[in-house]
Amino acid sequence: MWIPPDKYDAWYQTHLGSLCDKLEKDAIFSLFKPKGLVLDIGCGTGNYTYEVQKRGGKAVGMDTDFDMVLFAKNKATIKGVKPLFIVGNAQALPFKDNLFDGILEVTALCFIRHPETVIKEAHRVLKSDGTIVIGELNRLSYWAFLRRAKGWFKETVYKHARFFSISTLTEMLHETGFKDLQRSSCLHFPPIDSKWFLKIYKIFEKAGRTVFPKDGAFLVITGRK
């Protein structure tokens, strides 16, 4: 199911979407410090591409969807930032070996038929000692269950998505040759988009991070080449 870029971006304007975006970025960038040339695989409308640029990296955003890339480019003009955006296939990256200092991938693997191929391609284009960071939805979470359930009754973007466990992501990175893996997670509360609940979400988030630190709805894992 194809989603128009503006509708995709509208999620970040909701109370819940804005909060999730902040918590997910905190989790990603607590383990990943952008420096040098960084590739954002499956960049969508450029949300993380801009963040990499803002944090000091030289960002390249890549997506298979031309409309997403065009939308991201137009947003970059408005924001006054200058990352590079291109259309490309994550399973056959259009770059030479050992080019990037870092690779970022957030909720893109779940829509790709052969995610292990993407990991191998990322390893190929990373410089020695370069870092990959992956953010994906936890298949064991309540959030993933709700997305699957919605797909049973109507067409949604997540109907054919493949969610991951932290063990599956760990195995893929290990098998590809990545080392020094670090893991984290966030979103330990139910997806309730209301102001009253979002005022108390910290109770759930703090408890979840204390009891189940790696079992939140959003998983983060990093590895070094």
Image (cartoon, helix red, strand yellow):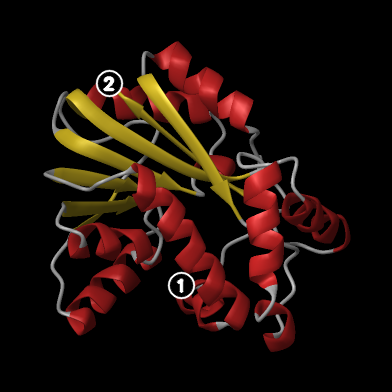
- Measure the alpha-carbon separation of dots 2 and 1: 33 Å
Residue 136 pos. (x, y %): 55, 45
Image point (80%, 51%), residue name: 145
Q: Front-most of 156 and 180? A: 180
Q: Residues within 10 Å of mark 1 (few under 14, many from 20)?
A: some
SS under mark 1: helix
Question: First in sequence: mark 2 or mark 1?
Answer: 1
Q: Front-most of 88 and 137? A: 137
Residue 111 pos. (x, y %): 57, 45
Image point (69%, 66%), residue name: 203
- Of the 4 image quadrants, the one containing the C terminus is top left
- Residue 216 visible? The answer is no
Residue behind mark 2 = 225
Above or below — where is 140 with respect to 59?
Answer: above
Which of the labelled discs sits on residue 5, or is there none? 1
Image point (47%, 75%), residue name: 9
